[in-house]
Image: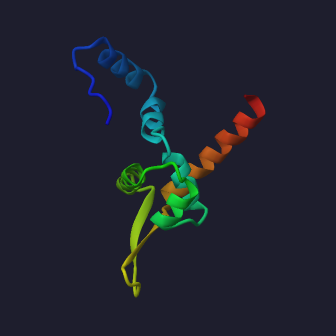
Amino acid sequence: MATQVKLSSSNAYNLTVLAASCNVNDILKAISPRWKMQILCKISSGTSQFSRLKDLFPTLSDQILGKRLAELVTEELVIKKQVPGTVPLQTSYIATPKGMALMEIMDQLHEWGEKEW
């Protein structure tokens, strides 16, 4: 769990100044938690079930995978669907158009990094 920043701290002030000067910082903060973009990448390329995602990232705990999936759903980057007719009931995750658009940008960022970094 992340440590709360005291509102009166210089760190809180710096975060406010950064947010006011460049809105990209908020976006970077939202997409930067560990595993988040890797999970979205796999979902956008067709891996849709918790257990299959877990198999792809064996060192990722169930707790963090569940947390990141919930964040992606809340941010409307993926939708969570129940798979009808499955016993036990199965859930799948599907990238939304918003999530796919973000993955296009992430792919471009990756290409830039390969070329320039």
Q: In this view, does 90 lie above or below 40?
A: below
Residue 105 percent location from the top left of the image: 60, 45
Tally of numbered discs? 0
Q: Which residue is drawn at 43% across and 50% down?
A: 61
Q: Residue furthest top?
A: 10
Q: Classify the position of the C terminus by image quarter.
A: top right
Q: Could you tell me which quadrant the N terminus lies in?
A: top left
Percent position (x, y) of residue 37?
53, 47
* In-front residue for pair 67/107: 67
Spot occupied by residue 91 in the image (x, y as percentages of width and height): 41, 72
The image quadrant that residue 14 belongs to is: top left
Q: How is the image coloured?
A: rainbow
In this rendering, position of residue 85 left or right of residue 113: left
Q: Is residue 49 left or right of residue 106?
A: left
Residue at image location 48% in from the left, 38% down from the top: 32
Q: Which residue lies furthest to the right in this view?
A: 115
Q: Nearer the viewer, residue 81 or 101?
A: 81
Query: Where does residue 98 sit, x and y in percent of width and height?
Result: 49, 55
**Residue shown at the point (38%, 51%) measured from the top left:** 75
Position of 3 relative to 17 (above/below): below
Horizontal arrangement in the rendering, residue 10 relative to residue 33 (left or right) = left
Instruction: Kindly give the residue lying farthest to the front in the view shown.
Output: 59
